[in-house]
């Protein structure tokens, strides 16, 4: 758009697209070629701009390729390599820890088996010692009981013999008294003893 003076406006007739303002100035539109108005084509689809579009596409693709090759791809490759190394280290560490755990479990199982065997040996030894002690204690108790029983039997035999002796004397005295009561005159001591002995034999 441009501005012209009133003198220039009076010299020429109004051109196409010119309008007169209230101040006497004339406005005109410039910079647009005749026939370009009203084409209705979207600029990227305009065939006249294809060469420039292809040129900018090649330039943009080249720049993008350079950026990818020089910056993005090395960085992604470095990240992937770092992660790969980290994963390999983690796997090695896991393998080492697993080997240590397996060795610890094996050692524990061996120690547990040895402890069980030792406990079994100790139990067998204690059982045998307990049996031996019980047998010795039983033999001592049985011997003591046998000794006490023999002493008791001897004492019983002694008491029995004494009782029998006393019974014999009592029986002789009782028989003598009964004979005196029944017969009158006293019987001799020999006759009473013989009668008591005969009574004992019959009993």
Image (cartoon, rainbow, N blue to C red):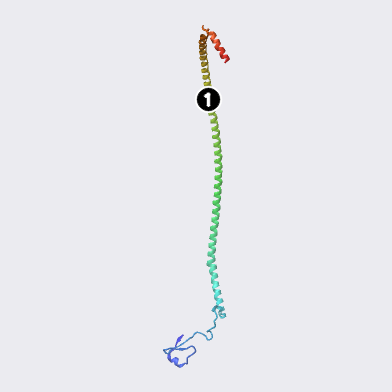
Compared with residue 117, is residue 143 higher up or lower down, i.e. above or below? above
At x 53%, y 27%, the residue is 141
Residue 66 vertical placement versus 202 (above, below): below
Q: Residue furthest bottom?
A: 11
The residue positioned farthest toward the right in the image shown: 202
Instruction: Determine whether 96 is above or below 190 in the image.
Output: below
Along the line of sight, the residue nearer the viewer: 39 or 80: 39
Find residue 22 and report its image quarter.
Answer: bottom left
Please provide percent x and percent y for residue 91. 55, 55
Q: Position of residue 6 (x, y in %)?
A: 43, 91
Residue 124 quadrant: top right
Q: Position of residue 75 (x, y in %)?
A: 53, 64
Which of 32/66 is in front?
32
Q: Residue at x 53, y 25 (%)?
A: 145
Query: Measured along the vertical axis of the image, is residue 166 above or below residue 82?
Result: above
Furthest toward the left, the residue is 23
Residue situated in front as seen by the camera: 81 or 115: 115
Q: Quadrant of the C terminus?
A: top right
Question: Which residue appears farthest toward the top when viewing the image?
Answer: 185
Horizontal and vertical percent position of residue 111: 55, 43
Residue tagged 1 = 145
State the SS at label 1: helix
Residue visible at 53% across and 66% down in the picture: 72
Answer few, some or many: residues within 10 Å of disc 1's Cα (few below 14, many 20 plus, some between 14 and 19): few
Report which quarter residue 35 is drawn in.
Answer: bottom right
Q: How many marks?
A: 1
């Amino acid at each position: 758009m441009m501005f012209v003076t009133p003198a220039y406006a009076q010299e020429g007739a109004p051109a196409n697209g010119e309008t007169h303002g209230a101040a006497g100035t004339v406005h005109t539109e410039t910079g647009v070629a005749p026939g370009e108005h009203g084409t209705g084509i979207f600029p990227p689809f305009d065939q006249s701009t294809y060469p420039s579009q292809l040129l900018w596409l090649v330039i943009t693709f080249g720049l993008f390729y350079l950026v990818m090759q020089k910056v993005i791809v090395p960085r992604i490759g470095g990240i992937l390599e770092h992660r790969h190394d980290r994963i390999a280290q983690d796997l090695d560490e896991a393998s080492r820890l697993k080997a240590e755990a397996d060795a610890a479990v094996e050692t524990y199982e061996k120690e547990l088996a040895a402890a069980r065997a030792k406990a079994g040996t100790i139990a067998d030894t204690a059982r045998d010692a307990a049996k031996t002690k019980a047998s010795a204690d039983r033999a001592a108790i049985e011997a003591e009981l046998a000794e006490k029983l023999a002493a008791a039997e001897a004492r019983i035999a002694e008491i029995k013999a004494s009782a029998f002796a006393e019974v014999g004397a009592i029986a002789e005295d009782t028989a003598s008294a009964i004979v005196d009561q029944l017969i009158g005159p006293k019987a001799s001591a020999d006759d009473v003893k013989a009668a008591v002995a005969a009574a004992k034999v019959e009993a």
